[in-house]
Image (spheres, coloured by chain):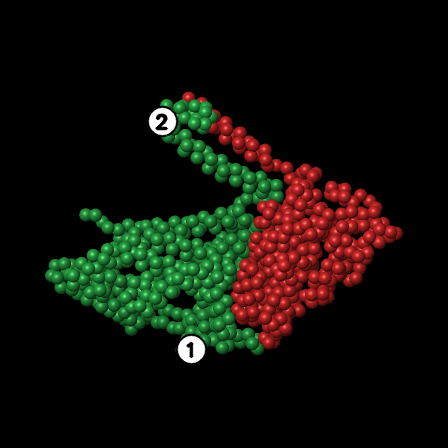
Amino acid sequence: MNIKKFDFGINNYLEDRPKLKKYLPQALTLFAIIFVLGYFTYNAQVNMGNRGIVFGFGFLTQESSFDIQFSLIDYDGSYSYGRAYLVGLLNTILVSVIGIFFATLLGVIVGISRLSSNYLVSKFAETYVEIFRNIPLLLQIFFWYFAALRALPLPQDAINLFDVTYLTVKGWFVPRLVWTNLSVFIGSLVLAIVAIIFTYIFAKKKQENTGKRIPAFFISLGLIIILPLLTFLFGGVKLDFEYPKLIQQAPTIFNFSGGVGIIPELIALALALSLYTATFIAECVRAGIMGVGKGQKEAAASIGLTPNQTLRLVVMPQALRIIIPPTTNQYLNLTKNSSLAAAIAYPDLVLVFAGTAMMQTGRAIEIVSITMLTYLTLSILISIFMNWYNKKIAIKEK
Amino acid sequence: MIKSLKSLVLVISASLLLFACGQQGGGAGSKKSKTLDNTKKAGFVKCGVSQGLPGFSNADASGNWTGIDVDVCRAVAAATLGDADKVKYFPLSAKERFTALTSGEIDVLSRNTTWTLSRDADIGLTFVGVNFYDGQGFMVRKDSGITSTSQFKSGISACTNIGTTTELNMRDFFNSKGIKYEPVAFEKADEVVAAYDAGRCDTYTTDKSGLAAQRTKLKDPNAHRVLPETISKEPLGPVVRQGDAVWEDIVRWSLNTMIEAEEYGITSSNADSMKESENPAVKRLVGVEGELGAAFGLDNEWSLRIIKQVGNYGESYKKHIADTDILPKRGPNQLWTKGGILYVPPAR
C-alpha cells in the first residue's frame, strides 16, 4: 500500500509500545484543546489590548442607572449591574417555571388524549400537536404578543371580570392579597401536610394488615381545607384584597393602580413557550404509554382493576420511565428558549444583562461568558433534578 | 524513547504557539493604516448602519441604502476606493453595533450613535465627529391632550429601544420629576413602533430625529405629536475602532470635507468648475492646490471625489431629511455661518 511507504515506520514503532499507543492520541487531543483555548484567550487579550479595553468584572458593582420594567426583587437604576443580573435571572427562572408547569400539564393531557378511543378527542389533540410543533417558536411568540396587544382593549374599556380583575393591553390586573398573621396561616398549612403524610402511612399499614381501605384522599382534602380555615376563625388570620383601581392621567390615558399587574410580555411568552413545548411533551407521553406492553393492561383488567386504576397503577409507573428522559430535554429546551423574550421586551436575563447592561458597559466578553455560564448552570441543575427523579422511579431489582 | 517523543510534542506545540504570537501585533503605533490596506484589498468599505431609520440609513425595496449616515460611508468609499458605491452595509441593532466594530466585522460605524464619554474612552472606540445634533424627545397620541412633558403623571408607560442612551436619559428625566414610570424596552425599533401603535405604551421616547422618522411608519402618523421638550444632548456621529489613527483621520476628514464644501458653496454639480476659483480654500478642497491627501496615503483628488459623488452636507441633508419631510428645518444642523452649530476645523 502507498500509505505504508510514508508512515516512516511510526506504526511499527507504536506497535511495539502498547502503552504509548494507548495514551498518545489522548495526550495529543488534550494538547489540541489546550492550544485552541489558549490561542483564543491570547488572541482576545492582544486585540483588546490594541483597542485599550481592560478585562475585568469590577463593573458588576457599579451603579446600573437604567430601570427594568418588571422585577421580583427591589430594583431601580440606583442598584448595581450585579443586581440587574439577578433581576434578569429571576425573571428567566419565573417564566421557565410557569412554562414548564403549564407545558407539563397540557402535554400530559394532550398525550393521553391522542390515545383516546374517542375519535373527536384524539383528532383534536393530533391537530393541535401538528400545528404548534411545526411553527417556529419566535413566530408564535410574536403572534401571541402582537395578536394579544391588538385584541385587548385600552384600560378604560378593560375586560372586566366580576369587578375584581381587569384584562387590558397594558396587562392583566388582579387583586393583591394583604395578609394579617400570615405566619399562622402558613403554619397551619405545614401542619395539614404533615397530618396528610401520616394519614397515608396509616392507611397503607391498615390496608396491608387488614385489607381494609381508608378513604385517605378525602381525609387529606378535608385536612388541607379545614385546618387553614380554622386559623381564620381562631388564629387571628385575616385576608384583605387590594383591588386595582382605574386612574385617569390625561383625557385619553388611563391606567390601573394598586393590585398586581401581570405584564402582557410575560403572559405572551409563557403562553407561547407552554403551547409549543407541550406538543413535544405530549409526544413523549404518548410514546411512553405505547411503550408499555399490551399484556400489562390486559393483565390489569383481568384482576379486576378499573381502566382508571390500570392507567394510574399499572401503565403510568412503567410509562414514566420512558417519558422522563426525553421530557427532561424539553424542560431544558424551554428554559433556553425563554431567551427569545428579548424580542418582545420581557426583561429576562438576555434582554437585561446581555442586552442593556452589555451595551451600557461595553463588556461583551465578560457579560456573554457570565450569561453562558448561567444558562449552563440552570440546565445542569434541571438535569440533575430530573435524573434524580428518574432514578427514584426506575425499576428496583430486588 | 517515550521521553524523547514527549519532548518532541512539547517542542512542536511551543513553536506553534510562538507562530500564533507572531501573527499578532501591528496596528497600534505603526504609521501605515492596516484598515486602509484591508479596505483596498477587499475593494469595499465595511459600514455598519441601522436596521432601518428613514433619513439616516434605510434600505429601499431593491436593497439600496440611503440616508445621511449612509452618505458618510459613501464619502469614505469615494475617498479611499474612488467609487462611492463600493460600500458593503451591515444592518446592526443598537446592541450589536459596538461589538461588530471592535471585533473587526465592520470598519466604520455610521448608525445614529450618540457620542458619550464612556463610549469614547472605555470600550475601544473613537468618535470622529458629529453629523447630526439631536436630542431626546417624546411622542404621544394627539387625542391624549398632552402637549408638554409637564403633563406626564405617575404610572405612565414608555416604549423605547434597549442598549441606547435613551434608557438612561429616560430614567434621569422621570426621576428628576418624581414620576413613576413603566419602561418597556425592545431590541428592534420596528417592534417599539408596533407596540406603541397597539397602545401598549402611552409615550414613545427616543432621539427626536428618530421620532420624526419612525412616525412615518405608524398607522396614522397625523394622530401623533412630538412634544416640544428636548431632555438630552445627543450628538450623533460616525465611530471607528481605536488603534488605527490614519483610518480615524480618513473618516473624520471625509465627514469634515462634506461640511466644509457646503460652507464654500461647492456642490456635486459645480465641483469641476470650482477648480478655477480664486479662493485657495476652495482650490484645496477640489484638489488643485496643496498635498492634503498625502497625509493619509491618498491621492490629491480624494476630496473632489467625495463632493462630486456624494455631494456636500447640505445636499445630503436636503435629499434625505428635508425633502422627505422628516425634519424640514435644519435647526442646529445648519452651518455656523447661517445660525447653526455645524463648525468644522479648516482643511489645510
**Picture coordinates of residue A372, whole percent (x, y):** 47, 49
Toward the top, the furthest residue is B1
Give the SS element for disc 2: helix
**Picture coordinates of residue B23, whole percent (x, y):** 59, 35
Give the SS element for disc 1: loop
The one of A16 and A152 positioned closer to us in this rendering: A16
Residue drawn at (51%, 71%), measured in percent from left and top? A150
Residue drawn at (58%, 43%), measured in percent from left and top? A48
The one of A199 and A378 positioned closer to us in this rendering: A378
Mark 1, residue position: A163
Q: Amino acid at mark 2?
A: Pro
The one of A20 and A57 positioned closer to us in this rendering: A20
Q: Nearer the viewer, mark 1 or mark 2?
A: 2
Mark 2, residue position: A18
Residue drawn at (61%, 74%), measured in percent from left and top? B223
The hue of chain B in the figure is: red
| The chain in green | A
Q: Amino acid at mark 1?
A: Asp
Toward the left, the furthest residue is A210
Q: CA distance from mark 1 to mark 2?
A: 81 Å
